[in-house]
Image (cartoon, grey):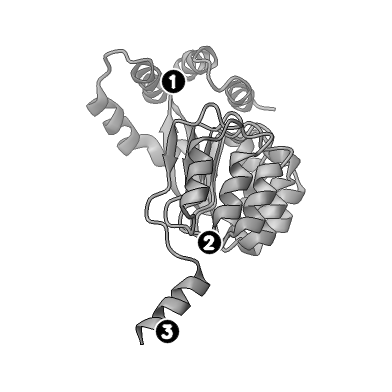
Amino acid sequence: MTDRAAFLAAIAAAPDDDLPRLVFADWLDERGDAARAEFVRLQCAAARGELADHDRIAALEAEHGTAWLGPLARVAFQVEFRRGVVEHAVLSARAFLAHGPSLRREAPVRGLTLLGAGRVLPELVRGPLLAGLSALHLTGARLGDDGVRLLATCPALAGLGTLRLGDNSVSDTGVAALARGPDLSGLTTLVLRDNAVGDGGAWELASAPRLGRLTTLDLAGNEIGPSGVEALHTARRLPALTGLDVTGQRPPAGRRLRALVAAK
């Protein structure tokens, strides 16, 4: 392991601690990379709420950001630097499968947006590539209920804090798998907007035995009726829930068809 890789591994092992990042900045200074060292220190200071020159941070990233990406520069569509290092990346799921091990070594990524994940989901969940993530975004990945069931049984996702599954044709069956998933107890944010979740799914979430840490639940644009909404609002199994979005509920497909026939 190179010195750089060792520093990045230390950052990944203690993602909420500034000390490994500041030690990394000292090492960068010693190696003559003053711009990167300054960037790390400035972003850390800004994250702590201290006065920081945000224009200088933006200028450093604009000038050097691509060079700092390493192998991510070849495959990522978008990245986000947080406290001096890349912590979120947007890339295709196939590229992540092909280059994931080296990417995870070269960048202490905590969040991923994987495009087209539905086509390679079995391979993704089978190995350790997703381990240690705090956020996984799979919006519009065409997972369906079968894909969600695979995710719900993926041991690598233990400790995941944010899971975004909007627009994935998820019904009550998929939601039940999530609600009962043994490795998703760390979730604090779950996004299921624009799916086909009905009252059954709402009741599953309201009575989920392992989702007690959820603070944010986005179910906008689904098919949940008043009883399902009430179950969520009064759910004793969700004591930490403070952000619940159930706006824009649509009637189930059968009810919409009957309404159209009646209108004719």
Disc 3 secondary structure class: helix
Residue 96 locus on image (x, y percent):
61, 51
The front one of 40 and 246 is 246
Give whichever of discs 3 and 2 has the lower sequence position: 2
The front one of 246 and 15 is 246
Q: Are marks 2 and 1 in contact (CB under 8 Å)?
A: no
Residue sitting farthest toward the bottom: 264
Please, what is the three-letter code of the amino acid marked with disc 1? Gly
Give whichever of discs 2 and 1 has the lower sequence position: 1
Which residue: 48% across, 72% down? 255
- Dividing the image into 4 quarters, which one contains the C terminus? bottom left
Residue 25 locus on image (x, y percent):
46, 17
* Neighbour tally class for label 2: few under 14, some 14-19, many 20 plus, Cα within 10 Å: many
Above or below, comparing residue 227 to residue 17 in the picture: below
Please, what is the three-letter code of the amino acid marked with disc 3? Val
Disc 2 secondary structure class: loop
Q: Alpha carbon of mark 2 to alpha carbon of mark 1: how far?
A: 55 Å
Which quarter of the figure has residue 121? bottom right
- Which residue matches tag 3? 261
Which residue: 67% across, 34% down? 210
- Which residue matches tag 2? 196
Residue 184 locus on image (x, y percent):
66, 37
Q: Alpha carbon of mark 1 to alpha carbon of mark 3: how far?
A: 73 Å
- Which residue matches tag 1? 32
- Dividing the image into 4 quarters, which one contains the N terminus? top right
Name the mark nearer the viewer: 2 or 1.
Answer: 2
> Is 181 on the left or on the right of 175, as rendered?
right
